[in-house]
Amino acid sequence: MTDTDNAPTGRRDRKKAQTRAALTAAALRLVAERGLEHVTVEEISEAADVSSRTFFNYFACKDEALTDDPALDGNPVVARLATVETRVPAMRAVRLALDEVIDAIQADGELWRLRLAVIAQNPALLPRLVAGNIATERDMVTIIATRLGVGTDHAHPPLVVAVTSAAFRTALLRWASGDDTRPLRDFVDEAFAAVAAGLPDPTTPS
C-alpha cells in the first residue's frame, strides 16, 4: 500500500477524532454551565455542529460523551507493563506503564480539569469513569502475577493494582482541583513515592 492509499484513511481518522473531541468538549461545557439534567444530546450535537445521528456514531448516551476518553484506553498500559524488565519492582513497573496516559491527560489538561469538575458536581458519573478500568486492571493482575512467578489468586498482584490505581486517581484529582501548577507527572510520582514509603504520616510545622 502506498502513501497515497494511506492518505484518505489518515484524513478520515483525523476527522473522526476531531468530531469526537468536539462532541466531548461541547458536552462538558454545557453540563458545567447548566447541570447534567438540563442538557440534551440534541443540544450537544448542535453545539458541536453535527447531527444527533452523528452523535450516536460516537457515543451511546450523553453520560458516555462526558466520561469516555482515548486516554483511558487501557491496552497501551497493559502492553507497556508487559515490556518492563522483570527486575523492576511491580509497583515501579506500573508507574512506568502509566507514562503515556499521564502525557495524554496533561496534553489535554484543560478538558480533563473540566471533566473532573463535572464529575465532582455529578457523582453519578464516577462509576462510569471507573468501570472501564475493570478489564485493564484484571489484565494487569495477570501480568504482575507472571512477573512475580505467583498465581493470579495470590494476594499481592491485585493489591499492587488496587493500590497503584488509587494512587493515580488521587494524584489526578489533586492535579485537577488544586492551585498547584505542577504537571500531573509530579503529582503521580509524589503519590507513588508515598505509597512506596509505607504512607508515613505527613509532618506538620511546629
Image (tube, helix red, strand yellow):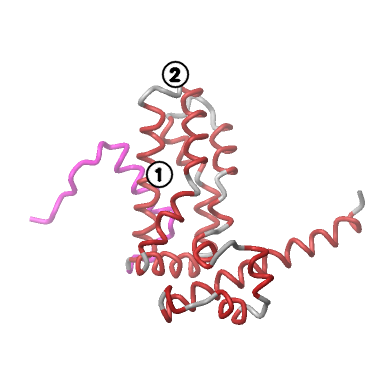
7 w.r.t. 111: above or below: above
Q: Residue at x 50, y 49 (%)?
A: 132
Q: Which residue is mark 1?
A: 165
- Type of residue at label 1? Ser
Locate residue 118: give its quadrant: bottom left
- Type of residue at label 2? Val
Q: Nearer the viewer, residue 37 or 111?
A: 37
Q: Residue at x 59, y 61 (%)?
A: 60
Locate residue 41: give its quadrant: bottom right
Earlier sequence position, callout 1 versus callout 2: 2
Q: Residue 37: horizontal and vertical position, in percent?
A: 42, 75
Magenta-colored span: 179-206
- As for residue 204 lying within the magenta part, the answer is yes
- At mark 1, the secondary structure is helix
Q: Left or right of 40: which side holds 55?
A: right
Q: Residue 49: horizontal and vertical position, in percent?
A: 66, 80
Q: Nearer the viewer, residue 80 or 143?
A: 143
Q: Residue at x 7, y 55 (%)?
A: 206
